[in-house]
Image (spheres, rainbow, N blue to C red):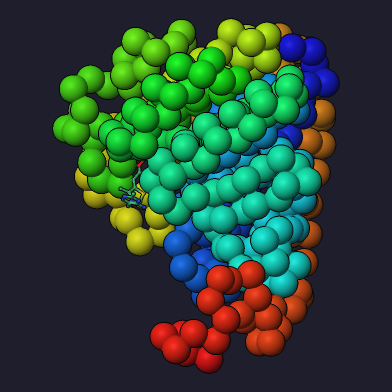
Amino acid sequence: MNKLLAEEIYYYMVLGRRFEYAAKEHYMKGDISGFLHLDIGQEALSVAAMKAFEKGDVFSTYREHVMAIARGIEPKAVMAELFGKSTGVSRGRGGSMHLFDPSHFFYGGDAIVGGQIPNAVGCAYARKYQGTEEGVMVVFGDGATNGGAFFESLNIASAQKLPLLFLCENNRYAIGTEITRVAPFLEQAKKAKPYMPTYEVDGMDALAVYKAVRDAGKMIQEGHGPIFVEAFTCRYEGHSMSDAGTYRSPQEMSICKAKDPIERLKSELLERFGCDDKMISTLEARAQKAVDDAVEFAAKSPEPELSELFDDIFCKRCANVVS
Ligand SMILES: Cc1ncc(C[n+]2csc(CCOP(=O)(O)OP(=O)(O)O)c2C)c(N)n1
Ligand SMILES: [Mg+2]
């Protein structure tokens, strides 16, 4: 890791957090509707994983705004998508959970918990068949590892030696259900162990995440078959905007926040990479400007045309669709 890359990761983490707070504010003002799942607290994982896996295909969860931005999708296009505007990355048709941009090899955002995992398996199979080297990364939560599709995916990815990096973001909760109430252990990598090599990493440590994902990415690209990386992290906000998060105690949250990934990387930049306070302020100001510009762009952008309502759907003027 060099200084420039560490600074870039810091920039995207600050941008990601401020973007999410802006999204929260505009949700409360009524500019954003539908579901909104914030990534606040999990930025080390979202940013460092994307930076470490720059070339291949990425499939992710619905908690993906920061991943999409770190992947290179313009914050303006992401915010406009949350606002449901025609300038959004999915042309205002997907919203928060369906940020989709093939030009950045980023295929969502999936509202179905774990739905992205078999999709990624299919993509990895195609990539192997085509003989491309980059491989595929799929990001999913701890809760998604309890679904059948997850186990089927481990099985076939392993049997076919697919170039697939399974990245589990274990924030210990599926909405309000603590993972150990519905799984026999905290470490979900144990489920993957019979099928492939597994690694655990501190998901609050951006530099550690970067290294783990980069090493795992190289291994899948060298043809060793799938790999499972589990990153332990913490979401600071409720599951979505409709969750007050009352199932977690103030003590639990303060232990979590004491490991804040942005503060941690900031200390590393200052102490290990020789950054000064001025550089940190410059990065933070740039990040804030990107967020302000994104909000302004989204607010001023037009709504999709009513005439486009039936575009991109299988059913044209169906009887059961109100037009
Ligand atoms: C197949 C399916 N079942 C249930 C839901 C409802 N649901 C939405 S999010 C969620 C929790 C998922 O938790 P996890 O996979 O740990 O991801 P996190 O929200 O923690 O990032 C559930 C059960 C859904 N969207 N899809
Ligand atoms: Mg979870």
Q: Quadrant of the N terminus?
A: top right
**In this view, 134 is above or below 310:** above
* Left or right, residue 278 beside residue 33: right
Q: Name the residue: 30% across, 36% down.
A: 148
Which of 197 and 294 lies nearest the eye of the viewer? Answer: 197
Find residue 316 and report its image quarter: bottom right
The answer to whether one can see residue 287 in this image is: no
Q: How many marks?
A: 0
| Residue 178, position as x, y percentages in the image | 24, 35
Left or right, 8 with respect to 217, comes to right
Q: Residue furthest front?
A: 129
Q: Which one is in front, 139 or 117?
A: 117
Q: Where does residue 150 sit, x and y in percent of width and height?
A: 37, 32
Query: Residue at image x 68%, y 72%?
Result: 85
Q: Is residue 196 visible?
A: yes
Residue at screen point 50% across, 71% down: 33
Q: Position of residue 118 (x, y in %)?
A: 47, 37
Task: Using the image as rendered, state which of residue 239 and residue 116 is in the foreground.
Answer: 116
Above or below, comparing residue 94 to residue 264 in the picture: below
Residue under the image location 66 percent in, 87 percent down: 306
Left or right, 315 with reference to 184: right
Q: Could you say where residue 31 lies in the image, as x and y percent from the top left?
A: 57, 73
The relative height of residue 96 versus residue 43 in the rendered view (above or below) is: below
Q: Quadrant of residue 164?
A: top right
